[in-house]
Image (cartoon, rainbow, N blue to C red):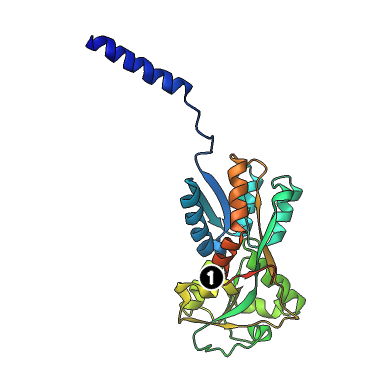
Amino acid sequence: MYRRLLSLSLYILLCLAVFAPAPAAHAEELRIFSGAGLMKPMEELRHNFEKQHGVSINVHYGSSGEIFGMLGVGQTCDVFIPGAAKYTMDAVKNGWIEPSTIKDIVKHVPIIMVPGGNPAGIKSLDDLARPGVKVALCDPKAAAVGRVSKKMLEKAKLMDKVQPNVVVFAPTANQLLVYIALGQADAAINWLDVTTWAEGKGKIEVVRIDEKRNMIKTIPTAVHVSAKDKPMALKLNDYIASPEGLTIWEKWGFEPCGQ
């Protein structure tokens, strides 16, 4: 009798397993390629989305040139967020990004970052060309802020004069912050949002760039054409640009594109 009951129980369990509704199919892990300078808001956005949707998200942070290059050699992601729209539009031209998924999120505002107290007395772009001033810039071939810095200085006809003062071409905006916070350079052209980071608190100051000379950029988010879980990738993309998401971006010093 006991064996019959046991056999019946096993049969029922087997039937339940066979005929139970299949769980929703999701990729094991969503993957984001993000500009390194966006790390602070992106980590908060990632954590919130994981908690809300029960998914795992892996974020690769690198310079905009690096993450663009990763797409170029065939690596794929679900969501692509470089530090400037140019990289997204170039990715669209190459057939890597779904154009209809592009959403402009926030502005990237260049400023001059100086050590606390501004020991070199930097007041404008022109001061970066003064003899003896130590300047830190990002590599224009690697980071969005490096590309913008080069264009800005060239437009102001200052690049040839500033070039001899450059003590380092850093690969990311994050490393520029470190150079200035440690006093290893007198000035750096960096993003305004990076100045809100705890690593620079009390160690750096901001010198605004004249609006007529400045080149403010847009940060977009978009979905890769080969996203493994397209529905969830679209949800993540929407969340990053949502009102809730924008509150997080603003918390970290970014200005929404609609303002």
Q: Is residue 78 visible?
A: no
- Could you tell me residue 126's position as x and y percent? 68, 85
Residue under the point 47% across and 25% down: 20
**x and y percent of residue 114 in the render?**
55, 82
The reply, left or right, for residue 16 in relation to residue 65 is left
Q: Nearer the viewer, residue 52 or 78?
A: 52
Nearer to me, 166 or 107? 107
Q: Residue at x 25, y 10 (%)?
A: 3
Q: Residue drawn at (54%, 45%), measured in percent from left and top?
A: 30
| Residue pointed to by mark 1 | 251
Residue extending farthest left: 2
Report the amino acid beneath label 1.
Lys
User: Residue 13 sits in which quadrant?
Assistant: top left
- Numbered disc 1: secondary structure: helix
Quarter of the image where one finds residue 121? bottom right
Number of callouts in the render? Answer: 1
Which quadrant would the N terminus be assigned to in this image?
Answer: top left
Above or below residue 197? Residue 121 is below
Q: Quadrant of the C terminus?
A: bottom right
Depicted 34 relative to depicted 75: above or below: below
Local crowd size for mark 1, using a 10 Å CA cut-off: few (<14), some (14–19), many (≥20): some
Query: Can the viewer see residue 112 in this picture?
Result: yes
Considering only vertical position in the picture, is 187 above or below 37? below
User: Which x, y percent locates residue 4?
Assistant: 28, 9
Image spot of residue 115 (x, y percent): 51, 83
15 or 253: nearer the viewer? 15
